Amino acid sequence: MSEFVRRVTRAPRPLASRLNQLDIELTERCPNDCVHCWIKRPAHDADARRREMTTEQVKDVLRQAADLGCLQVRLTGGEPLLRPDFEEIYVFARRLGLKVWIFTSGRPITPRLADLFARMPPLRVIEITVYGMRRETYEAVTRAPGSYAQFRRGLELLLERKVPFVVKSAVLPQNKHEIAEFEAWAKTLPGMTRPPGHAMFLDLRARGDAAERNALIKSLRLPPPEGLALMTRDAAGYRREVTRFGDKFMGPRGDRLFHCGAGECISIDAYGCVQPCMSLRAPEWTIPLTRDTRLADALDRYAGLRDLRATNPEYLRRCARCGLKGLCEQCPAKSLMEHGTLDTPVEYFCEVAHAQARYLGWLGSQEYGWEVENWKERIDRSQAAAGAG
Ligand code: SF4
Ligand code: SF4
C-alpha cells in the first residue's frame, strides 16, 4: 500500500461473486507509433511477445470471468487485433456468452475477420480511433507509412458487411484543424447514433517508464482555454448537459480516494497481471494471476480500495474540499501517472475543471473550487439560466 495513503479498518468483505466487466489488454504491441500513445510497444517487440499471456491463459481468464457472472469483456491493447490468436480468443469469448467490446485502429481488419464479425457479432459496437481525415494528417500522428490506407480499407470491410462500429478521435496539434470535417464525416456512418467522442486531455503513460515519452505527451496537450473552446462549440448544449450532470455529481467528496468503478470492472494487462482499472498500475494493487491466485481473489482484495483515504496535505486542502471533483479528471490513477502517488492534485486537470466552472458561472474569476460552500445554490442558479436560455 502507498505510504501516502492510510487504510481505514473495516470488517473483511465476503468473497466477491460478481464481476461487471473485464478489460483485457491483449498486447502492448501496435503497428502504429502514435505520438500521444500511453502504452505502445513496437509490433515486432520479441521480448513483449514472449511475455504475453498464451492463448490458453487468456481463455482461462475468460472462463474465470464468466464464472464470476461477467457479461462483457473489452479487448484492447496496444492493437488487440495484432495477436495471431485474436480470432480464437474472440470466438471463445462469444461462445461463453460474453459481449465483446473491441477497441482498435481498424488497420489489421482483414476480409476474414470482418466476415467473422458479420457471422458472429460482438454484440457491442466496435470502437475505432481515427487520427486524421487524410493521409498526411493521419500519418503525422501514427508515424506509420501506409497506415491511413489500411485503416480506410478496414472500415470499408466492416461497412460492406454491415458490421456496426463507431468512430472516435484523439484531438492533437496534428489533426485539430480537421475536427469539424471529422464530425461531419462521422455523421454519415451508419453506426453513429450520436456525435463522436474525442480524447481531448491526454493522459501520461500509465507505466511511468519513459520520461521522454511523457514530455512529448505534455507538449501535445491542448491548453485548457483551447479545450474549453472546443467543448463549448455548441454552447447551449454544453451548458445544458454539464449543468444536468453537475446537479447530480458536484460537491466535495472528502478524503476517500475512490468514487469510481475501479476494482469492480477490473483489468488484466498483456502479461497476466490484474489491476483495479486499466489506468491504475500501482504495484501494491497489481496482482499476477497464477494457478492459486484467481480473478475472484483479486476482486476480493480490491474491495479494500473503498477504504483508502488521502493523507497528502495538498490533496486534503484542495481536492478533498473541492466542489469540482465530479467535473475534474483528477483521480488516483491520473495522480499516479503524473506524480507517483494516489493523492496528489493534477494541475493540468485542475486548470481544465476551473476553466469550465468559470465559463459556467459556478466560480468567479479569482475563486477556486475548494473555497466555495454554496455549490447547490450556484448550480441551481446556472440551471435556471440554462433553462431560460
Ligand atoms: S481511471 Fe481513475 S476514475 Fe477511472 S476507474 Fe481508474 S481510478 Fe477510477
Ligand atoms: S479541480 Fe483541482 S482541487 Fe478540484 S478536484 Fe480537481 S485537481 Fe483537485
Image: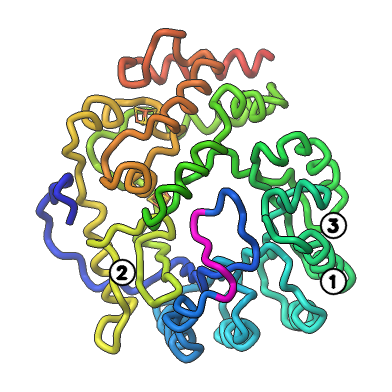
Q: Mark 3 points at which residue?
A: 190
Mark closer to the chain start, 3 or 1: 1
34 falls in the magenta region: no
In the rendering, which numbered label is found on residue 157? Answer: 1
Q: Which residue is drawn at 72% across and 65% down?
A: 106
Marks 2/1 in contact by CB < 8 Å: the verdict is no
Image quarter (top left, top right, bottom left or bottom right) of the C terminus: top right
Quarter holding the N terminus is bottom left
Other residues around mark 2 within 10 Å, as few (<14) / some (14–19) / many (≥20): many
Tell me residue 255's x, y (percent): 22, 37
Highlighted range, magenta: 38-44
Residue 297 picture location, percent across and down? 26, 75
Disc 2 marks which amino acid? Leu
Residue contact at pointers 3 and 1, CB within 8 angstroms:
no
Label 3 and label 1: CA atoms lie apart by 14 Å
Residue at point 43% right, 78% down? 65
Dot 1: element: helix
**C-alpha gap between disc 2 and disc 1:** 39 Å
Q: Amino acid under label 3?
A: Pro
Vertical position of residue 233 compared to residue 27: above or below: above
| Residue 4 found in image quarter | top left
Residue bearing the label numbered 2: 299
Whether residue 95 is visible: no
Looking at marks 2 and 1 on the same chain, the residue that comes earlier in the sequence is marked by: 1
Regarding mark 2 in the picture, which secondary structure is present there? helix
